[in-house]
Every structure is written in C-alpha cells, then in structure tokens.
Amino acid sequence: MEFLLACMMSTNLIAEYNLEGFTPPRGENAYPSGLQPKDQGHYKYGPASIDDPVLIIVDPIYDKRMNIIPAGYYQLSLDAGREFLYLVQSGNTIAIIPVFKIEIDRQKDEAKRKDQMPSGYFKQKKYIWKKNRATKKRQRLIKQKKIDPDEHVYSEATIEYSAKDRYYLIKFEKDSVRAWGAIKAR
C-alpha cells in the first residue's frame, strides 16, 4: 500500500512538473524581449492620430549597421514633447527619428484660441448663457448633419535624399507645427 501511495505521489509531482512547462507564460515571461505593445512610443506618449500625414518611402533605407526601413507607406507622427518623429506602420514603430529643427506658427495658435474664447468671457452669467445656447445649436446642427463635427487639419510629410551628405531629410507638417528630422544612410 505504501508503495502504491509513493508511486501516486511521485507521478503527481511529475505530472505537475510537466504541466508547468506547457502552461502559457504569465507576466514578464509573456514578452521575452521585455517590450510590450503599450510600452512603445506611439502608445506611451499619445496614440497616433488619423490626421497624421502618410510618408511614402519608394526605396528601402539602409544605415551603417545594415538595419533596413523597407519601402512602403508609413504614418509619421510627432511625439508630445516634440523631440522625436515616429515612423509607424500597422501600429508598429519602425523607426524613431530625432527632431533637429522645429517651427511653431504662433499666429495660427493665437487665432485658434481667440476663436474658441467667447466675446463676453469675463461676464460669467452672459458667458454661461451664450455657451449653453451655442452648444445646443451646434448639437442640433450636427444631428441634422448640416455641419461636420471634425475640422480638417492640414498635414504633410515629405522625404528627400541628399547625395552629397548621404542622409534622408524628413519634413513633418501638421496644422501650425513643422518639424525636420534626418536619417543617416550608409
């Protein structure tokens, strides 16, 4: 009887050990590289907008270490800190490009802010009444589909190759922000 009990216990231990190898990994072991999708830049620092421009790369780009950016269509987005350009394809970050020059058109920003501010801003009661009236009217027009709730934002992305210095210049333009980044080619 003891022998039978000992055999049953040892097979249970063996079975547990074997099952442990077949169970799906959990926690940090689920991503051996350590980089989860939510940790990627375009998820972490704000998702890419549908208004971000599309960059078309005709020829593959190689760097000194023979890393490749294949030819194709890419979404070019600027991070929230305006320090990096993200080259995104199908939700995956292909390249992170440092921004070396940025221009912000302050006049467009100021005009946009003034349009958003009501005329009698400091008169609270009037402001609240006007705001409620305006939002109700806007909601009614949206329901009737007389106006488009989303405004179109101008966006453009271009890429140029400088044969003399052997680098690709990437220009990003969206609304009032322009940014330039470069990829050194081999």
Image: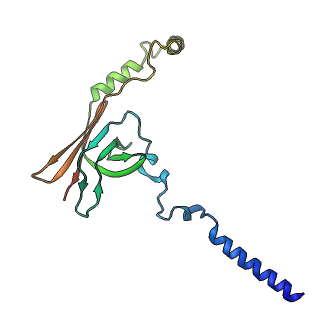
Image quadrant where one finds the N terminus: bottom right
In terms of image quadrants, where is residue 136? top right
Seen in the image, is 24 located left or right of residue 7? left
Q: Residue at x 30, y 46 (%)?
A: 72
Q: Residue at x 46, y 12 (%)?
A: 146
Q: Residue furthest left?
A: 164
- Residue 16: x and y in percent read 71, 74
Up the image or down, 156 lies above or below 73; here it is above
Q: Residue at x 32, y 21 (%)?
A: 111
In terms of image quadrants, where is residue 7? bottom right
Up the image or down, 121 lies above or below 173; here it is above
In terms of image quadrants, where is residue 129? top right
- Residue 73: x and y in percent read 32, 43
Image quadrant where one finds the C terminus: bottom left
In the image, 156 versus 59, the foreground residue is: 59
Q: Residue furthest right?
A: 1
Up the image or down, 44 lies above or below 126; here it is below
Q: Residue furthest bottom?
A: 3
Q: Residue at x 44, y 15 (%)?
A: 147
The answer to whether residue 128 of the structure is visible from this angle is: no
Seen in the image, is 106 located left or right of residue 91? left
The answer to whether residue 151 of the structure is visible from this angle is: yes
Up the image or down, 44 lies above or below 62; here it is above
- Residue 185: x and y in percent read 20, 56
